[in-house]
């Protein structure tokens, strides 16, 4: 075989690789434009992060102008929405430290655990039983409300390997009700309807509002102390992403494992009865590793800030790619039911969350 033959690259492979790289570059440029748009005061003032702007802009493009994108670029868009997403979620852990979580102690931890678990259970039940949603859409909607908004939706989407339009519906719920909370909560607090002191307001705001930016925006209208407590409680909820994803991975594989066990007991063999691979979200363990690294302060603060900025951009790329892959026709079918599920969760977060906050303060106060 000649040297030329050894080093030759099959034309189809080279074309596919080039198309994928072009797709990733296209998403990166799109995300850069989205980041600039999200920085516009009118948009930033609404608490809309680049992630949320990205999925909206991506969906508009994907439904109105996608025919202008070469088909070979689709692999790059898919790479951004899947593999890049996992990496970005892992590095999201650099925003949390165990020292910060320790500052709010048991009250903050109790508030976070109770809100996250109850919201996930209620959201999944209401979505599947009352609204007749499929499992993935119900879980994604519940996760966005329970843990950390769009970032949680992204993490769950990766674990569930669900369709992009289901993530888009869940993010829509985060946008609507999270933005509403940012304006409604301070009004309710100042009117005296919440019956909470400053510490209670921090626990309630951080424990029940969807996005980190929305928590900061709402709590800043109360006091700096409330903002500090609310932010730490919110990041405690973010920390719970790891155990929740591991539990969900076990839960969604339970029927497959039972089926495999039954087949083995009956003496059946073959690939048709092989147990499905356990969907352990390894990127969640990477998230936990980043939390430990951040807690040990082994990285200079400037380096951590730089990585966080790059990570936000990578998450924006992933969300934009999901938007491009989303089809409005698919959303239209389950949209009202998913939104109603989000509304049920929102009512729970206000009423149930307030009850949890009162109970936590009484128990640990």
Image (cartoon, rainbow, N blue to C red):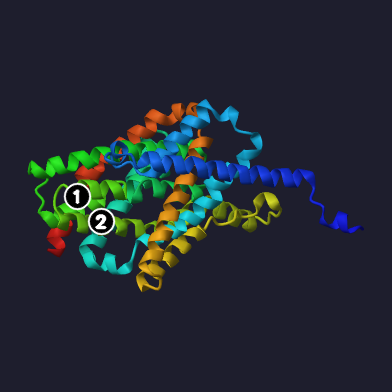
Query: CB atoms at circles 2 and 1 under 8 Å apart?
Result: yes
Tell me if I can see residue 283 in this picture: yes
Q: Residue at 52% x, 58% y: name it.
A: 280
**SS class, disc 2:** helix
Q: Report the front residue among 67 and 167.
A: 67
* Residue density around tag 2, few if under 14, some if 14–19, many if 20 or more, within 10 Å: many
Dot 1 lies on which element? helix
First in residue order: circle 2 vs circle 1: 1
Name the spot of residue 270 as percent of width and height, x first: 71, 53
Residue 141: percent from the left, percent from the top? 38, 41
**Residue 65 position by quadrant:** top right
Q: Residue placed farthest to the left in the image?
A: 192
Q: Is residue 246 visible?
A: no
Left or right position of 221 against 277: left
Quarter of the image with the C terminus is bottom left
Q: Which mark is residue 231?
A: 2
Q: How many marks?
A: 2
Residue 300, label in figure: none
C-alpha distance separating marks 2 and 1: 8 Å
Q: What residue is shown at x 19% (from left), y 39% (from top)?
A: 184
Residue found at x 31% / y 58%: 235
Of residues 296 and 111, which is closer to you in this image? 296
Q: Which residue is mark 1?
A: 219
- Location of residue 68 in the rendering, given as x and y in whole percent from the top left corner: 59, 29
């Amino acid at each position: 075989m000649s040297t030329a033959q050894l080093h030759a690259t099959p034309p189809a492979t080279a074309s596919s690789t080039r198309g994928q790289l072009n797709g990733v570059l296209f998403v990166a440029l799109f995300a850069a434009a989205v980041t600039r748009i999200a920085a516009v005061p009118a948009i930033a003032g609404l608490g809309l992060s680049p992630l949320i702007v990205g999925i909206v802009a991506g969906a508009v493009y994907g439904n109105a102008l996608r025919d202008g994108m070469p088909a070979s670029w689709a692999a790059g868009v898919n790479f951004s929405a899947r593999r890049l997403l996992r990496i970005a979620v892992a590095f999201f852990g650099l925003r949390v430290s165990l020292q910060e979580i320790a500052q709010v102690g048991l009250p903050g931890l109790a508030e976070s655990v109770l809100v996250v678990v109850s919201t996930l259970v209620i959201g999944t039940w209401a979505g599947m039983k009352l609204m007749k949603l499929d499992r993935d859409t119900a879980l994604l909607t519940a996760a966005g409300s329970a843990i950390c908004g769009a970032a949680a939706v992204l993490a769950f989407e990766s674990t569930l390997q669900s369709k992009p339009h289901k993530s888009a519906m869940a993010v829509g719920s985060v946008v609507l009700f999270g933005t509403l909370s940012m304006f409604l909560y301070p009004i309710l607090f100042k009117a005296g309807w919440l019956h909470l002191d400053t510490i209670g307001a921090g626990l309630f705001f951080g424990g029940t509002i969807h996005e980190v930016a929305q928590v900061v925006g709402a709590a800043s209208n109360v006091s700096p102390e409330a903002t500090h407590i609310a932010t730490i409680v919110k990041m405690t909820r973010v920390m719970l992403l790891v155990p929740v994803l591991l539990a969900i991975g076990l839960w969604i594989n339970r029927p497959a494992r039972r089926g495999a066990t039954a087949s083995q007991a009956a003496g059946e063999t073959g690939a048709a009865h092989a147990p499905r691979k356990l969907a352990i979200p390894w990127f969640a363990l990477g998230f936990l590793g980043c939390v430990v690294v951040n807690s040990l302060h082994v990285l200079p603060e400037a380096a951590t800030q730089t990585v966080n900025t790059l990570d936000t951009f990578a998450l924006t790329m992933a969300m934009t790619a999901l938007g491009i892959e989303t089809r409005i026709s698919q959303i239209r079918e389950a949209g009202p039911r998913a939104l109603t599920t989000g509304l049920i969760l929102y009512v729970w977060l206000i009423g149930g969350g307030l009850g949890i906050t009162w109970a936590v303060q009484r128990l640990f106060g």
